[in-house]
Amino acid sequence: MPTEILMPALSPTMEEGTLAKWHVKEGDTVSSGDIMAEIETDKATMEFEAVDEGVMGKILIAEGTEGVKVNDVIAILLEDGESADDISATPTAAPTEQPAATAEAAPAGGSDKVAAPAPAAPVKDGNRVFATPLARRIAADKGLDLAAITGSGPHGRIVKADVENATAAPKAAAAPAAAKADAPAATLAAGPSTGAVLKTYADRPFEEVKLDGMRKTIAARLTEAKQSVPHFYLRRDINLDALLKFRSQLNKQLEPRGVKLSVNDFIIKACALALQQVPEANAVWAGDRTLKFEKSDVAVAVAIDGGLFTPVLKDSDSKSLSALSSEMKDLANRARDRKLAPHEYQGGSFAISNLGMFGIDNFDAIINPPHSAILAVGAGVKKPIVGADGELTVGTIMSSTLSVDHRVIDGVLGANLLNAIKDNLENPMTMLA
């Protein structure tokens, strides 16, 4: 019986992707484990392996197609003895489940939802109405009765074009006020429509830049985070003089091993230890409860062309500075090449965003759910300070802002966490104890 091959979910949050490339063509023999295609998500290009043996009977989604929903049928696989004629004769072939793909070329990820399966096929006069899963899903979205649609596909099967060209029965118009009241908050707060913006700037020269999957996901997730997560902000200045001196001494000792510690490596370690020192803050929001963690999994924002990754350094509290430095360099390099696997940039309870190397003194970062906090780090700048004895001197001061999810971390708890980070950075030798 022909088998429908579905668009796989390459990560728990993937909703759609781009079918970048087919590695097989119609008529090719496919064995379990063969690379069939490359799928692009918002963060990665991943190889997609076959789980069944057979012959590629029909490719339904052309390579280069964007916005292919998870669970859409992308191809039909034939078993031995079957022919292309069997495809139309079995319109509801059993789909084959696809495993998580292997990350080889570049990134994966997505939004927070997995697409729902297509609605069940309807029945007309006691007989099943034959329609593709995609046609059934579109019909459900448009409110169409499949039993009233004539299919143009093989043996009268209803296909995508049939439901796209069909018109739903007219519905009573809702009162404008009610429509506005019932509209989702995110829609109401989304700003002017594309058409309205284009009309506003119709008399000005501009270039339209198409959003890729990563930019769409970043826009959606950060908009949702800013609107739904109750942020509050805590700020401290941190004196880096002792850390810079200690770092210089360590780097001289580590030079024969080819290790060079950055200030950011110390910040990662300081945050990881602070989450252990203030364990109530090492938690995330989980809808009707919080999840409190034993280990410190710290995410670090890494800028790449067109967006960013937040690779996670797991068990950061128990790793040495040199180990953290080596791991961070590896993750950052592979992030820029878009070669991170999903498990390497998902999870964690806390994040760091450092713009100090770009000359930024201070800024407020948006929390990346489900994290409960993110530390925004600015540049270390020489400033006049008052010494312990009241004398005026000069010190290297770094501004830090902790953005906190008030559902998880209250003001005093957040203050204790930021104070612990500051103490660790201003007394760097204690981080080696």
Image: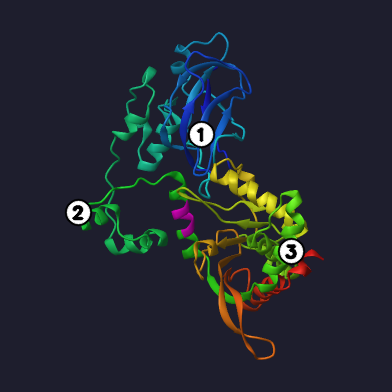
Residue 422 position within the rendered picture, expressed as x and y whole percent measured from the top left: 67, 73
Q: Is residue 245 above or below residue 184?
A: below
Q: Quadrant of residue 278?
A: bottom right
The reply to whether the magenta stretch includes residue 33 is no
Q: Position of residue 26 (x, y in %)?
A: 47, 16
How far, Cα to Cα, is label 3 from label 1? Answer: 47 Å
The answer to whether 324 is drawn above or below residue 84 in the figure is: below
Q: What residue did someone put label 1 on?
A: 39
Which secondary structure dominates the residues rendered in magenta?
A: helix
Q: Nearer the viewer, residue 236 or 278?
A: 236
Amino acid residing under circle 1: Ile
Residue range in magenta is: 218-222
The Cα atoms of the two marked residues, 3 and 2, are separated by: 60 Å
Q: Which residue is mark 3?
A: 249
> According to the image, label 2 marks what residue?
202
Residue extending furthest toward the right = 433
Which one is earlier in the sequence, the residue at label 1 or at label 2?
Answer: 1
